Amino acid sequence: MFPKSGEKCMGKLGGEMKALAKHCGGSHKTVNDRIHIVQCFDQHLRELNIQIQRVAQIKVRHIESYIHERLAQGIGKRTLQNEMASLRAVLQQAGRKQVAEHERLTNKSLGLSGESRSGTRQAITPDHYRHVLEMARTKDPGLAAALELSRLMGLRSQEAVQSAQSLKTWKQAVERGDTRLTVVFGTKGGRPRETVILDASAIKNERSYRFKCSGSDYPFSIVT
């Protein structure tokens, strides 16, 4: 388990690694995850009474010990591949390239190779989607609206939830015949992106689909 984000139990080493983790860059979530990982590594060293106070003192064996313990805890190899990537990034940021790229710290040497990086998620079937949508319509029209936005416009969940401020702009884009929409709110890392309308015919068919800004408790609804 990672230490709780609010725990203030890090020593000098943990504090230095946390600062380096921030400087490595990435989205807010990536940086936050990286900080949790270095906190976990720092805690591991302290539990073993390994008294080092600087990143410059980290040895290959310290990282090997950490990964071996995590494997013994039953942590998945893909998770540990991500943890090693974070530790390597922090070491690189500190100028410890020789340690970060050491042959004993490759995924293969650490026993972390062999796991597929291919995604395992599959799109839900149309029948399952319709069933979930009907249930949502009876319980929470706002949720149903978010589901329809996600399905028809290729939005991520947070993008759909936070899309109320974009609905009028999107409506105008659809009426112009645009096939792409600019997504601003709820995006990963807060970076605007473009999404392709996945079902343009459904959106263009005014008899079956229209936007309506709502004054009720939920921020928007899509009325069919």
Image: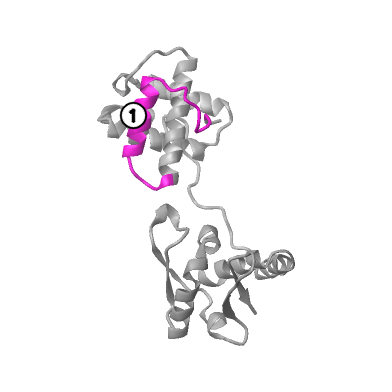
Which part of the image, by quadrant, shows the N terminus?
A: top right
Residue 118 at x, y = what percent? 49, 51
Q: Nearer the viewer, residue 134 or 124?
A: 134
Mark 1 neighbour density, 10 Å: few (under 14) some (14–19) many (20 or more):
few
Residue 174 at x, y = what percent? 47, 80
User: Which residue is under mark 1?
Assistant: 103
Q: Quadrant of residue 141?
A: bottom right
- Judge whether residue 24 is colored magenta: yes
Q: Specify whether 19 is left or right of 181.
A: left
Q: Give the residues drawn in magenta, as a range.
A: 3-28
Residue 126 at x, y = what percent? 65, 70
Q: Quadrant of residue 209?
A: bottom right
Q: Amino acid at mark 1?
A: Glu
Q: Specify whether 54 is left or right of 64.
A: left
Which part of the image, by quadrant, shows the C terminus?
A: bottom right
Identify the residue at image location x=34%, y=21%: 58
Residue 148 at x, y = what percent? 60, 70
Identify the residue at image location x=47%, y=69%: 166
Identify the residue at image location x=45%, y=61%: 185
Q: Against 116, is 154 above or below?
A: below
Is residue 11 shown to the viewer in this render?
A: yes
- Element at label 1: helix
